[in-house]
Image: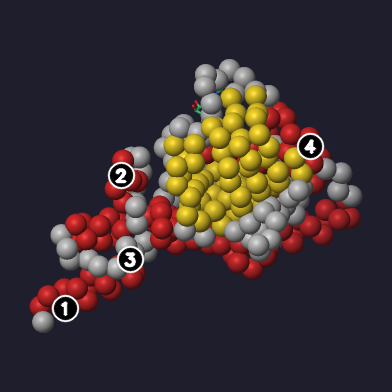
């Protein structure tokens, strides 16, 4: 096995003003090139986990961090967030809120300037990065005049311009329409597949995660309570229900059929194979 690119070793964290632990005894490894989905209820610690990877916790927010978070070989507690931004890019749920500049090009230039990238390099990086997110030629447009999906792809471009090895997306599509959601997830999947980028997504839409993720990590009360492939995790329908988490509809249907003795074999997590299997089941029933 290769060295993990992200590794949490017995990490517990409390916010300066927080009561109790936001993260509790976290052990987690992420391999380079992995696509990991983080699931959990509100307050489970998902965002805090992401903020540990980009170093905002603890270097900017303070509080008390125990254990170690190592990212690309660096102990995050020892590096300023500006340095970590060259390794980890993080985008949030509200793209409009992340826009502060008059033009798309300036939006991307901002982070590059802050990390001291020379002007002639910026001139090369900006169009290159816009092309990656499907916004080629958008340099002079106003960020606020873009659609939600385009804005979120611009927010992603702004972090990609720093050439990070890891992209973290915190509920990146919760303010987007179905087309915008599709655009963002397709792009992240492409970066993961074609560029080998490590992707960590915090996401409530289990169907989407069943489709894209290599691994699903479930948080509850600051602890990791499940960690496995989407097929492993989403087949544990009753446990997820006890945690008040949704499962993909395909898995829910198969679980009902299994309870009635009508389903043998693995629980499907994706819609298409489940529809085919139910179809065969009905066919056999008829015959
Ligand atoms: N800045 C803060 N100061 C104090 N406590 C905080 C702060 N941010 C989060 N917390 C607390 O830490 C715990 C974990 O919060 P976190 O935001 O990581 O959860 P989450 O899983 O991202 O939730 P959501 O789905 O609502 O985004 C919660 O108990 C929350 O109240
Ligand atoms: Mg959150």
Q: Quadrant of residue 282?
A: bottom left
* Dot label at residue 79: 4
Please say if the residues under marks 1 and 4 sit with CB atoms less than 8 Å apart: no
Tell me the crowding category of disc 2: few under 14, some 14 to 19, or many 20 or more residues within 10 angstroms, Cα based. Answer: few
What residue sits 66% from the left and 58% below the top?
32
- State the separation of the CA atoms marked 1 and 4: 61 Å
Element carrying mark 2? helix
**CA gap, disc 2 to disc 3?**
18 Å
Which residue bears the numbered disc 2? 241
Please name the residue that numbered disc 1 is placed on. Answer: 283
Question: From mark 3 to mark 1, how far is it between C-alphas?
Answer: 19 Å
Q: Label 1: how many residues lie within 10 Å, few (<14), some (14-19) or many (20+)?
A: few
Q: Position of residue 219 (x, y in %)?
A: 47, 40
Residue highlighted by disc 3: 266
State which tag comes first along the sequence, 1 or 4: 4
Depth check, front residue: 121 or 91? 91
Q: CA distance from mark 2 to mark 4?
A: 40 Å
Relative to the observer, which residue lies in front, 209 or 243? 243
Indicate the quadrant containing the N terminus: top left, top right, bottom left or bottom right.
bottom right
Disc with the residue nearer the chain's start (1 vs 2): 2
Q: Position of residue 175 (x, y in %)?
A: 47, 43
Would residue 211 be found to the left or right of residue 129 on screen? left
Foreground pick, 186 / 281: 281
Q: Mark 3 and mark 4: span between their CA atoms?
A: 45 Å
């Amino acid at each position: 096995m290769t060295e993990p690119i992200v590794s949490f070793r017995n990490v517990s964290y409390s916010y300066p003003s927080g009561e109790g632990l936001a993260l509790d005894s976290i052990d987690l490894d992420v391999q380079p090139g992995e696509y990991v989905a983080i699931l959990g209820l509100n307050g489970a610690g998902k965002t805090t986990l992401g903020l540990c990877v980009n170093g905002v916790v603890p270097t900017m927010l303070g509080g008390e961090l125990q254990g170690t978070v190592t990212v690309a070989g660096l102990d995050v507690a020892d590096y300023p967030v500006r340095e970590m931004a060259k390794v980890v890019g993080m985008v949030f749920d509200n793209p409009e809120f992340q826009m502060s500049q008059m033009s798309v090009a300036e939006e991307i230039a901002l982070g590059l300037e802050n990390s001291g990238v020379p002007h002639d390099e910026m001139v090369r990086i900006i169009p290159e990065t816009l092309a990656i997110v499907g916004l080629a030629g958008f340099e002079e447009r106003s960020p606020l005049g873009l659609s939600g999906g385009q804005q979120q792809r611009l927010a992603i471009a702004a972090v990609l311009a720093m050439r990070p090895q890891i992209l973290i997306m915190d509920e990146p599509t919760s303010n987007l329409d179905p087309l915008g959601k599709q655009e963002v997830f397709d792009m992240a999947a492409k970066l993961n597949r074609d560029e080998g980028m490590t992707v960590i997504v915090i996401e409530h839409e289990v169907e989407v995660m069943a489709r894209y993720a290599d691994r699903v990590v479930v948080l509850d009360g600051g602890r990791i309570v499940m960690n496995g492939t989407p097929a492993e995790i989403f087949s544990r329908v009753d446990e997820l229900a006890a945690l008040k988490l949704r499962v993909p509809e395909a898995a829910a249907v198969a679980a009902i059929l299994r309870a009635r003795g009508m389903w043998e074999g693995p629980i499907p997590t994706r819609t298409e194979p489940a529809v085919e299997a139910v179809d065969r089941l009905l066919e056999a029933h008829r015959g």
